[in-house]
Image: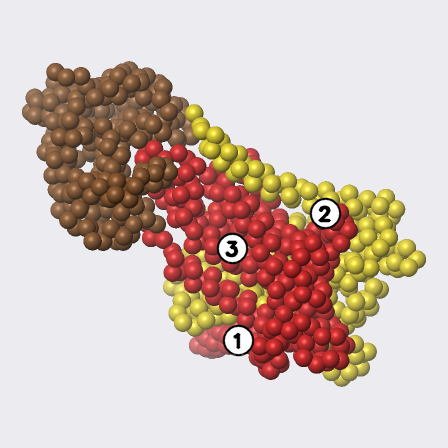
Chain colours: A brown, B yellow, C red
């Protein structure tokens, strides 16, 4: 088995006096979809926000432990570099309202002042929008503002924006919970296509979604990693009683 | 791990913030320091001295304190029924719709007219009218004076108390009003017995803020108050307020004690206005938090 | 319930409502009177010559207000150069560092500054600048006006930025954009319409201010573009001419009042339009 793209070792996260993550150890295989699920407040969003070092931006937040991206310790790097290597898509689609679709897609470059020729930018825009299955719908309207799109399209734009930076890992934090079923299924289809080129870590509170879309699933409860394994195994024969109870709807 | 641009930016933000605080402190300190000559020379006598005579070097500011108080309070008194009516009308009777927004825009317009234009109009339209009134009443027909200033001020001050009072009145909880109506109360009764008492402190705050505005108003008052430096004998006497005496005499104040006395008046004005405004804003903040 | 009692109350109710409506209408009356009077008196004076000529000495016909117009614009520019950067930065500070000692002090300072009488600001500018420089100047007048603009700019910037959804900042930070670039290139642009509205409103306010200019800019009968010399402005001109004993100057003052009122109203309308049209959807 090839080396994991991301390794989390004995990771703890705090928010003031509350401990949100307790001693989490987890490793993520390359080019697969890993779902992180659990009831509200279990720490799954905090976990992914620690991966791209957004957690520490909140006042009163602390974290300890190691996270390795391809054997590089993320916590000894400049956080800005970390965030350029790991992309994130949020629950509520958030294209930049003052920018066109074109500029939104390459916002990661433009905002950072990375200069590129017009041709290069065009190429990146088309590639990213194709990867997020939005190209056919917006080609020809690239100069329009991103906020005119539907919810599902906006979310795909956000995915394109993250993909444009060529990240190794894409963090999706409940990406479909604000979308209607049709848009949700589009995104789920997209996730299946994307995993060939990028590793996807998907936070979801929707158990069925995790079952549909992921190759591996991690179950978190009250900040601890309860169980982790291939999705079809975890969903059919969970090892831990708490996993079973969560899957059968006893809580959460 | 912040880059240099990052630190510069954060430093810039902090600097601007500090600059605001320093600015305010510097204003108070400057006024204080430049009032020292007259503070030292006259002490408390400055506040109750009745004579203001730059020629002989006597500086008593009582005439201006009285002028300020009379004009401001009279202005508030005159404007109160109007502001309250607007507040009740827009906050309770007609909260939305074309006429309501027309009214609201008109009031905003009223607040946007420059003070010097109020003064100009006051001088050419109001003062002759008052002169006529004074002649009928058998008083010396100056036209200018405390009454004229109070009337102009009252017009200028209406938008301030009206808008705050309107906000507070419209925030009175619907269920209180419904309870009163269901008991058979008329609109008037609901307004007087439920709404106004509930919104009482907010209305008071609006009045305070209007007072703060009136105290500091300079140009319109200067143009119609008559520029007289003695204690006013009646509401129709010419007079001066703290603001208007500064406006009239500052450029003539060549020697230190004179200048320092005017600066001291400015300091007093600032202190009084600040206290009134802070109290008013404090009450409003408490109101909005409670609601 | 006694019938007479009810009818009495109903009558009182109707009369109260009438009184309220009458008082409301009476309140707008001064506005109408003033506007009508200004239009009547002023519009006859206003023509192209009026706007482009310099004031003439008393008794000579055909004076104009060109130096006052230019002066007003120059003073506004100086005031903005000073107050806009400081005000926006302070406003950004308040929206980013919501709690904390300094934030509290800044908010307090802004409130006190907003309530400070304009003539006191004039005194301050005189003591700080005019006395040091040894002469009246456009510069000191501009600074005085700028100080008056600060509170409104700080407050509207803070209010506008507070309304911007938090997840917009997150989206930018998650792309690896550093904090300061996120604020400058994402947050402030998103709030630009509100910020500009605040600037326009405060410009409209200071455009009509006279008191702080009485002993800073001081006024002048000449056209002046040198910021270190005295300068005229519309409100100053109106004040000086209105309080003079010459009828010729009075009509000039009416014309100037007309121009000033139109200018201030236009600015306010423009500010309102900007707020509505440019509003960014989230």
Q: In this view, does C187 lie above or below A34?
A: below
Of residue A211 and residue C77, the one placed in the foreground of this image is C77
Label 2 CA crowd tier, 10 Å (few <14, some 14–19, many 20+): some
Give the residue at x 45% y 57%. B171
Residue under the image location 69 percent in, 73 percent down: C55
Q: Quadrant of residue B36?
A: top right
Residue C199's disc number: 3
Residue B95 lies, in percent from the top left, at: 42, 66
Tag 1 subunit: C
Are labels 2 and 1 assigned to the same chain? yes
**Mark 2 falls on what kind of element?**
helix
Q: Is mark 3 on a helix, strand or loop?
A: helix
| Camera sees residue B137 | no
Q: Where residue C40 appears, x then y in whole percent?
A: 59, 82
Q: Which of marks 3 and 1 is in front?
A: 3
Q: Which mark is residue C25?
A: 1
Q: Which of C14 and B27 is in front in this view?
A: B27
Q: Which residue is drawn at 68% across and 42% down?
A: B26
Seen from the viewer's position, the closer of residues A84 and A119 is A119
Q: Name the residue under label 2.
A: C128
Is disc 1 placed on a helix, strand or loop?
Answer: helix
């Amino acid at each position: 088995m090839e080396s994991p793209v991301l390794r989390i070792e004995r990771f703890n996260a705090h928010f003031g006096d509350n401990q949100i993550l307790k001693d989490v150890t987890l490793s993520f295989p390359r080019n697969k979809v890993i779902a992180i699920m659990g009831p509200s407040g279990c720490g799954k969003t905090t976990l992914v926000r620690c991966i791209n070092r957004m957690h520490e931006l909140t006042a009163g937040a602390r974290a300890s432990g190691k996270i390795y991206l391809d054997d590089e310790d993320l916590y000894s790097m400049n956080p800005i570099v970390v965030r350029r290597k790991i992309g994130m898509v949020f629950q509520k689609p958030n294209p930049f309202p003052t920018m066109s679709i074109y500029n939104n897609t390459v916002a990661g470059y433009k905002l950072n002042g990375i200069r590129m020729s017009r041709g290069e930018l065009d190429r990146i825009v088309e590639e990213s929008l194709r990867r997020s299955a939005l190209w056919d719908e917006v080609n020809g309207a690239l100069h329009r503002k991103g906020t005119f799109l539907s919810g599902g399209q906006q979310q795909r734009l956000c995915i394109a924006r993250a993909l444009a930076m060529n990240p190794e890992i894409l963090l999706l934090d409940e990406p479909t919970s604000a979308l209607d079923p049709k848009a949700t299924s589009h995104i789920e289809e997209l996730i299946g296509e994307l995993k060939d080129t990028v590793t996807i870590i998907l936070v979801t509170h929707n158990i069925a979604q995790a079952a549909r879309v992921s190759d591996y699933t991690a179950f978190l409860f009250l900040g601890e990693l309860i169980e982790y394994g291939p999705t079809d195994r975890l969903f059919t024969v969970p090892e831990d009683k708490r996993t079973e109870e969560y899957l059968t709807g006893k809580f959460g | 791990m912040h880059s240099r641009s990052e630190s510069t930016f954060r430093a810039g933000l902090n600097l601007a913030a500090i600059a605001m605080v320093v600015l305010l402190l510097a204003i108070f300190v400057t006024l204080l320091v430049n009032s020292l000559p007259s503070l030292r020379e006259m002490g408390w006598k400055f506040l109750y001295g009745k004579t203001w005579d730059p020629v002989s070097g006597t500086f008593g500011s009582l005439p201006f304190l009285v002028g300020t108080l009379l004009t401001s309070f009279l202005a508030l008194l005159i404007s109160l029924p109007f502001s309250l009516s607007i507040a009740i009308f827009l906050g309770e009777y007609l909260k939305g719709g074309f006429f309501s927004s027309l009214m609201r825009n008109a009031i905003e317009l009223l607040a946007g007219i420059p003070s010097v234009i109020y003064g100009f109009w006051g001088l050419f339209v109001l003062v002759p009218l008052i002169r006529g009134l004074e002649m009928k009443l058998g008083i010396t027909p100056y036209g200018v004076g405390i009454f004229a200033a109070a009337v102009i001020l009252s017009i200028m001050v209406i938008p301030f108390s009206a808008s705050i009072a309107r906000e507070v009145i419209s925030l009175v909880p619907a269920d209180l009003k419904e309870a009163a109506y269901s008991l058979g109360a008329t609109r008037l009764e609901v307004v007087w017995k439920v709404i106004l008492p509930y919104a009482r402190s907010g209305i008071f705050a609006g009045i305070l803020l209007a007072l703060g505005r009136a105290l500091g108003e300079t140009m319109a008052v200067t143009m119609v108050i008559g520029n007289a430096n003695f204690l006013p004998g009646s509401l129709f006497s010419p007079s001066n307020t703290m603001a208007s005496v500064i406006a009239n005499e500052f450029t003539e104040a060549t020697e230190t004690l004179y200048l320092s006395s005017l600066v001291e008046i400015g300091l007093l004005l600032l202190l009084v206005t600040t206290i009134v405004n802070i109290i008013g804003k404090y009450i409003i903040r408490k109101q909005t938090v409670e609601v | 319930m006694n019938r007479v009692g009810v009818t009495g109350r109903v009558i009182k109710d109707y009369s109260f409502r009438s009184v309220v409506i009458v008082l409301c209408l009476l309140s707008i009356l001064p506005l109408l009177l003033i506007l009508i009077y200004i239009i009547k008196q002023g519009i006859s004076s206003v023509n192209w010559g009026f706007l482009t000529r310099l004031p003439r000495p008393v008794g000579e016909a055909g004076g104009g207000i060109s130096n006052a117009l230019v002066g007003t614009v120059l003073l506004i520019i100086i005031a903005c150069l000073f107050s806009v950067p400081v005000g926006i930065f302070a406003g950004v500070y308040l929206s980013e560092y919501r709690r904390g000692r300094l934030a509290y002090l800044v908010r307090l300072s802004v409130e006190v500054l907003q309530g400070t009488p304009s003539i006191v600001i004039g005194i301050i500018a005189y003591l700080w600048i005019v006395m040091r420089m040894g002469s009246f100047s456009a510069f000191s007048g501009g600074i005085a006006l700028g100080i008056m603009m600060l509170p409104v700019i700080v407050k509207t910037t803070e209010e506008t930025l507070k309304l911007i959804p938090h997840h917009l900042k997150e989206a930018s930070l998650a792309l690896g954009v550093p904090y300061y670039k996120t604020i400058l290139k994402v947050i402030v642009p998103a709030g630009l319409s509100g910020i500009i509205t605040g600037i326009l409103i405060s410009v409209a306010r200071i455009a009509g201010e006279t008191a702080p200019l009485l002993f800073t800019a001081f006024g002048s009968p000449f056209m002046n573009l040198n910021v270190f010399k005295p300068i005229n402005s519309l409100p100053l001109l109106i004040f000086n001419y209105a309080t003079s004993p010459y009828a010729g100057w009075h009509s000039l003052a009416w014309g100037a009042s007309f121009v000033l009122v139109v200018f201030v109203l236009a600015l306010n309308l423009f500010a309102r339009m900007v707020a509505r049209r440019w509003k960014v959807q989230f």
